[in-house]
Amino acid sequence: MSIDDFSKDHPKPDGINFGYGTAGFRMKATLLDSVAFRVGILAALRSQFKKGQTIGVMITASHNPPPDNGVKLVDPLGSMLEASWEVYAAELANAPDNQLQAKVDSLVSKLNIDTSVRAHVVIGRDSRESGPALVAALEDGLKAMNANYNNYGLLTTPQLHYITRAINTKGTPDAYGAPTEEGYYEKLANALKKAVPDLDEPLKCVVDCANGIGAPKLRALAAMLDGTLSVTIVNDQYKEPPMLNMDCGADYVKTNQRLPNGVTPEPYQLLASFDGDADRIVFSYVDDKKAFHLLDGDKIATLVGMYITELSKEADLDLSVGVVQTAYANGSSTKYIVDNLKVPVVCTPTGVKHLHHAAEAFDIGIYFEANGHGTVLFSPAAQIKLQTAPEDCGPVQRRAIDSLLALSDLINQTVGDAISDLLLVLVVLAINRWGPEEWDSAYKDLPNRLDKVVVKDRSLFKTTDAERRLTSPPGLQDKIDEVVKMFNQGRSFVRASGTEDAVRVYAEAASKAEADALSGRVSQFLH
Ligand code: NG1
Ligand code: ZN
């Protein structure tokens, strides 16, 4: 059957303009059938363009509510789809039904794609009810292109990134691991044992899995790590899709700055929260007065930054370490990294692809968004230095090198990964013999507030300096500067959201009252 024949079963809804954003296509699942079908075609084209290398497709809407879903592509080395193809994705998604074949032909000729190459695609999905039907639509797109595909069923987003990279590097010197879900667990389990070789007691944590796919996957890993990892999994009802992300999970905990439903932690007990597809994680705890404390992506970056800086000094291999943040990083975290850790900080626009790219400039680049999405990248040069260091160097140096090598396997370097980041944090805490309170005490977050303001046309809001300053609408930045000056340790910026039809206002200041007031003043300028 031809593309047009298949397309009859997947008509495009009228009046919608589909955009491929930082999270791929994402919206109400009921609107996504034609998009999933066409992404199947696009994934096949991308694979053919990449000479038959395997491309990943993930069906997920992460932390969004249960009726939503989304679809995004994973490039051969496990990174997000190359930016120039986001445009082709949108063009294909928006082509009228009767012009789909013509659009495909024009892309083939424009990109000089050899259509005799057999395309290879792997598919994963989160636990949403709409997932199987969208996978079926996607498979129709792949069949229309005569692609070879493998549906892995339920996976976390980072597992699909891992599998994609593992397939494409199999049998090469850069082999990433066995290209299966089991291979993912084996790699993490082996790395964890190497990262904490002399553990007195298992690493412990209560983990809120947002009633998502992270629950069974973390359980599968923990089963292989009896004696090394002891997790208590809560909000694990992934077979009840209407419960996904409801009053629990990383986004709920970070946004509301409160405990998720379903937990009553002891004072100073460490709690982790995953998001719905397990690529984000934040931690929290309550103190002896039952006050809630959040340990977000900034706190993870500083903890990991501290440990990796120490190790790289001891390893003595001249490895450059850097941290990448966005404007949403708490000012205290940036100050702590620069002043105490003496590590350079780079600020990029929002969206992991920007952070990931900036982190590649370092031998060891640590990046986390404040919302808990992040990872650590080891450059190829750093990997070689670590792997080829002499066996008989001093014991401190040797131990540091071995620890860095273990970390480079423990960390999912393709993308932020809640399971891998959980292990990383537990390792650093165990090595320092710290609980959440000691971790939290490195610096105190400046009180802050993040608001959303709906405006007539958010496209008028243009920024510069990694989104920290507005260049448009004219005059607005000057007004913000004036009001910021009136607040102790004040900082505020405004930018258009890339995922919602709204403008975000961030404000921080020396006290909660001042942060609230600053945010209020800046928000007034937008009405
Ligand atoms: P937008 O809507 O552009 O602010 C949000 C998050 C990003 C990122 C993307 C998803 C905040 C302030 N923004 O982006 O960090 O996670 O969604 O790709 O948390
Ligand atoms: Zn997610």
Image (spheres, grey):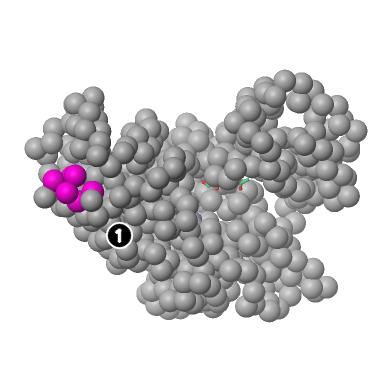
Picture layout, residue 154 above or below residue 79: below
Residue 472 appears in the figure:
yes
Residue depicted at 24% across the width and 39% down the height: 98
Q: Nearer the viewer, residue 33 or 382?
A: 33
Quick check: which quadrant has ligand 1? Answer: top right
**Magenta stretch bounds:** 2-7
Residue depicted at 68% across the width and 69% down the height: 259
Left or right relative to 404: residue 464 = right
Mark 1: which amino acid?
Val
Residue 429 coordinates in the image, percent (x, y): 60, 62
Residue 196 coordinates in the image, percent (x, y): 48, 64
Residue depicted at 33% across the width and 59% down the height: 134
Picture layout, residue 8 above or below residue 188: above
Total numbered labels: 1
Q: Nearer the viewer, residue 267 or 155?
A: 155
Q: Nearer the viewer, residue 135 or 257?
A: 135
Q: Secondary structure at mark 1?
A: helix
Residue 61 coordinates in the image, percent (x, y): 46, 56
Q: Is residue 201 magenta?
A: no
Picture layout, residue 275 above or below residue 237: above
Residue depicted at 22% across the width and 28% down the height: 106
Left or right relative to 513: residue 332 = left
Prevalent SS, magenta region: helix
Residue 326 coordinates in the image, percent (x, y): 61, 39
Q: Quadrant of residue 153?
A: bottom left
Q: Quadrant of the C terminus?
A: top right
Left or right relative to 179: residue 62 = right
Residue 203 appears in the figure:
no
Residue tagged 1: 135
